[in-house]
Amino acid sequence: MRLFKTALLLCLFVLSGCVAVIESNEMMKRTQALLNTDFQGTTIKDLEYAEGKYHHYDLYLPVDKTNTRSQKLILFVHGGGWTSGSKEDGENWCRYFAHQGYTTAALDYSLQTKGQTPSIDDMVEEMHLCIEAIVAKTAEEGITLDEMALNGFSAGGCLALLFAYRETPELPLKFVIEQSAPTTFDPKEWEEGVHWFVTHTTGVNGSAEGAAAFITKMSGQTVTASMIEDGSARSIYEAISPVCHINYASPPTLCGYGLTDGVVPPSHRQLLHDHLVEYSVPFDYFEFPHSGHALAYDMDVQEAFLEQADEYCQRYFTLR
């Protein structure tokens, strides 16, 4: 009986993973169709912003480098659960906005894989280094950047939100776009509403030991079970939780979530919504009623989301 239960759990894990992959592939195909443009600008691949395997970015320059729009940077941050994904995931988004005249880029950042343990703060610091490199490179190409926005999906959306709400950017950050982003590292907010494989991956299972390991991994600081129990770990996970840094000066936020998402708990989108309302931050919130984490099955909503992203560029960038 025990062997049967183990086999059943393994099958469910594999099945859940297959469903996620299928949905993600479907999402990519459908979204690519919406983002498809006849981009005629310049693409410069695999530029280095620091030493190391993951420290590269791709730069997309518009045809007209004299237009005001070219001075606006939109940086894409890829998803993948902080363990996978790459800058190539943002190619279509970058080509789409660059086709409209904006300078765009997508970066790789250090991943928690193959024995590597970069923290959320490490990844955010790499975003700073990348932006510095982009500013310098575009200047060589005849473009002086003066404003920026961030665009992120899933784990990348989380990094984009944290950067936007907590950091002092190299360029004035006018707005942030995210889809399916986690918004807190409070382990209590990871215990419900997720697939079994997410619980398995994060280790958040309701125990103090699981919570401590999760926060240790994400924060890079040693957290113990006793710190979970006495509440002293709170300041550590709040420091890397985007919702904990929202204030009255936070940039406008465009966000989208699937209502059947089993990867990011439902409470995360509600926390983001409530904090944005509390601090009177301009925002637009899109729900994808039939979609999970990959937002694959509501192309009408995805199209409206994309139109709103265009509107954000027009409204919040300083265009002359």
Image (cartoon, helix red, strand yellow):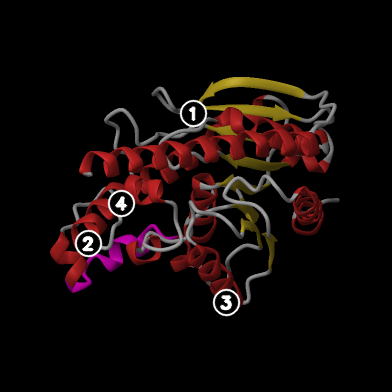
Look at the image and tell me whether residue 135 can be seen: no
In magenta stretch: residue 239: yes
Amino acid type shown at disc 4: Ser
The question of residue 223 being in magenta is answered with: no
Disc 4 target residue: 219
- Where does the image place residue 158, in percent across and percent down from the top left? 50, 52
Of 19 and 278, the residue lying toward us: 19
Circles 3 and 2: CB atoms closer than 8 Å: no
Q: Magenta region: which residues?
A: 230-241
Q: Find the distance from the CA under tag 1 to the CA under tag 2.
A: 40 Å
Helix, strand or loop under label 2:
loop
Could you tell whether 79 is left or right of 205 in the image?
right
Depicted 223 relative to depicted 249: above or below: above
| Residue displayed at 48% across by 51% down | 263
The answer for how far apart the CA atoms under marks 2 and 4 are is 18 Å
Q: Earlier along the polypeptide chain: callout 4 or callout 1? A: 1
Residue indicated by mark 3: 279
Task: Name the amino acid type tagged 1.
Answer: Tyr
**Disc 1 to disc 3, how far (Cα)?**
35 Å
Which of the 4 quarters of the picture holds residue 71? Answer: top right
Residue in view at x 31 percent, y 28 percent: 114
- Closer to us: 209 or 93: 209
Q: Residue at x 74, y 34 (%)?
A: 32
Q: Nearer the viewer, mark 1 or mark 3?
A: 3
**Kind of residue at badge 2:** Ser
> Which tag is nearer the camera, tag 4 or tag 1?
4
Q: Which mark is residue 49?
A: 1
Nearer to us: label 3 or label 2: 2
Q: Is residue 159 left or right of residue 287?
A: left
- Mark sitting on residue 207: 2
Q: Secondary structure at mark 3?
A: loop
